[in-house]
């Protein structure tokens, strides 16, 4: 397994590949996948692929993300 796929490059971030999950961080941890999705990295990789690399967010993008997270309760 290529561990580096689950880590962001320097000054970057990665987004959890699971559909509907907006988790973003410098690394997508096994703990996140297990606790939030009940899946291992292998299972997530098979079903959803590797995390998407994202550029470091600016303040407006972060606020938009928080907004979406808060308004996502009804779904
Ligand atoms: Zn996730």
Image: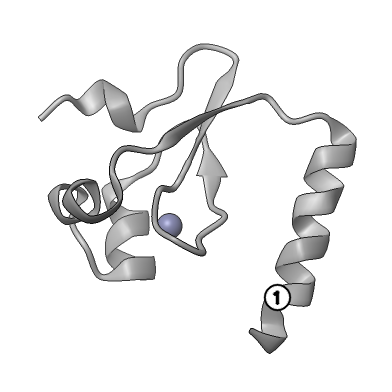
Residue lying farthest to the right in this orientation: 60
In this rendering, the answer to whether 21 lies above or below 63 is: below
Residue 4, given in percent of the width and then of the height, sits at: 27, 22
Seen at 53% across and 38% down, the residue is 25
Q: Nearer the viewer, residue 30 or 47?
A: 47
Left or right: where 33 falls relative to 65:
left
In this rendering, the answer to whether 73 lies above or below 29 is: below
| Mark 1 element type | helix
Q: Which quadrant, please, contains the C terminus?
A: bottom right
Seen at 57% across and 20% down, the residue is 12
Residue 72, given in percent of the width and then of the height, sits at: 70, 75
Seen at 30% across and 51% down, the residue is 48
Residue lying farthest to the left in this orientation: 1
Say how the picture is coloured. one colour
Please name the residue that numbered disc 1 is placed on. 72
The residue carrying pointer 1 sits among few (fewer than 14), some (14 to 19) or many (20 or more) residues within 10 Å by Cα, namely: few
In this rendering, the answer to whether 5 lies above or below 27 is: above
């Amino acid at each position: 397994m290529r561990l580096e796929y689950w880590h962001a490059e320097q000054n970057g971030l990665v987004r959890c590949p699971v559909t509907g999950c907006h988790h973003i961080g410098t690394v997508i941890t096994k703990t996140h996948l297990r606790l939030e999705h009940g899946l291992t990295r292998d299972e997530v990789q098979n079903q959803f692929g590797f995390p998407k690399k994202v550029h470091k967010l600016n303040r407006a993008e972060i606020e938009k993300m928080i907004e979406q997270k808060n308004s996502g309760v009804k779904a």
